[in-house]
Image: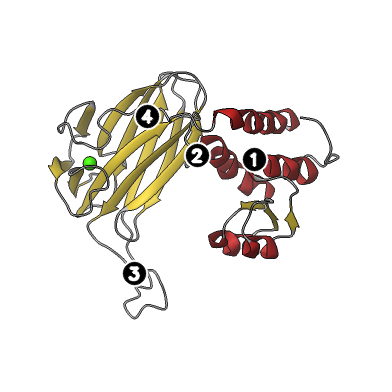
Amino acid sequence: MKKLLLLICGSLLSMAPFIDAAAQNYVINGGFEFGLEANWTHAKLPGTAATFTLNAPSQAKEGNVELMIDLDNGGSSKYGVRSTTTALVASDSIYLLRFWARESKTFVYDDKDPNYVANPDFAEMIVTIEGESGNKHEVSYRFRQGMTLFHLPFKTFDKNLAISFYPQTNGRTYYIDGVELIDQSNDRNIDVWYTYVWNNMQSSTDIAWVAGDNDVSMLEHAGFGVAVANASAKAKAAADFVTAGERGAGVCEAVRRFVLDVSADLEV
Ligand SMILES: [Ca+2]
């Protein structure tokens, strides 16, 4: 475990010189601008019913069209219908799948809103990433409000990946757009390594890693809040500990101090 954490820290730090490189997107036609079937396949298991069409909505996030899946009868299997694209990644490493999606019925979940629905019947969609070795990542998403950006950072040792979207809740229409699979050779706005580390560390360590004002509520709910040196003033004020280092260096500093429980001046 310690070796893994130190490896992650070393990788975070070593990524710094390359942070301005362009991100590589491994999904073809993720915005559905080049037709319904281009690099995508759509399937329905026996007993299920759905239509897959292109839509030109006002909420398209990439270009002018998005994929529309109208689910009439999902059948008995939770994998009744699917829309799948494939990606051949450059190497076994860490990647980030992100996409925009919404469904036809919008719920209000703010309990201060007069239209608040106490027990909404959320629509669900399962997303899977499967490699040729059989390794599989599976996440279930619930829709709340309008077009939403979803992130799934993951590690794979496979190079051939199948990315599938499985709408689950019957009688709904689902919309997907801007599907991207990107690697860690990133522009400064997307840090795949940091996203992966944050996504997989916080639950096991009960430490929250934050930088901006919008993260303050997460800090207050965490067992132990850590803010990096370049965090906002509000985030620092709400944190239990503020690192000396900024960004990735600050994360590594906190990992050494609180997760590995070793001297903060340990070389990595
Ligand atoms: Ca599009």
Residue type at the position of mark 4:
Asn
SS for callout 2: loop
Residue 108: mark in rendering: 3
Determine whether, in the image, residue 77 is placed left or right of residue 187: left
Residue drawn 30% across the image and 54% down it: 147
Q: Earlier in the sequence, mark 1 or mark 3?
A: 3
SS for callout 3: loop
Name above or below for residue 37 compared with residue 259.
above
Pick the residue in front: 116 or 240: 240
Q: Earlier in the sequence, mark 3 or mark 2?
A: 3
Circle 2 is placed at which residue position?
188
Name above or below for residue 140 compared with residue 10.
below
Q: Earlier in the sequence, mark 1 or mark 4?
A: 4
SS for callout 1: helix
Determine whether, in the image, residue 82 is placed left or right of residue 109: left
Pick the residue in front: 1 or 231: 231
Q: Position of residue 94 (x, y in %)?
A: 51, 29
Residues marked 2 and 4 touching at CB (< 8 Å): no
Q: CA distance from mark 1 to mark 3?
A: 36 Å
Residues marked 4 and 3 touching at CB (< 8 Å): no
Circle 4 is placed at which residue position?
25
Q: Residues within 10 Å of mark 1 (few under 14, many from 20)?
A: many
Q: Position of residue 157 (x, y in %)?
A: 51, 21
Circle 1 is placed at which residue position?
248
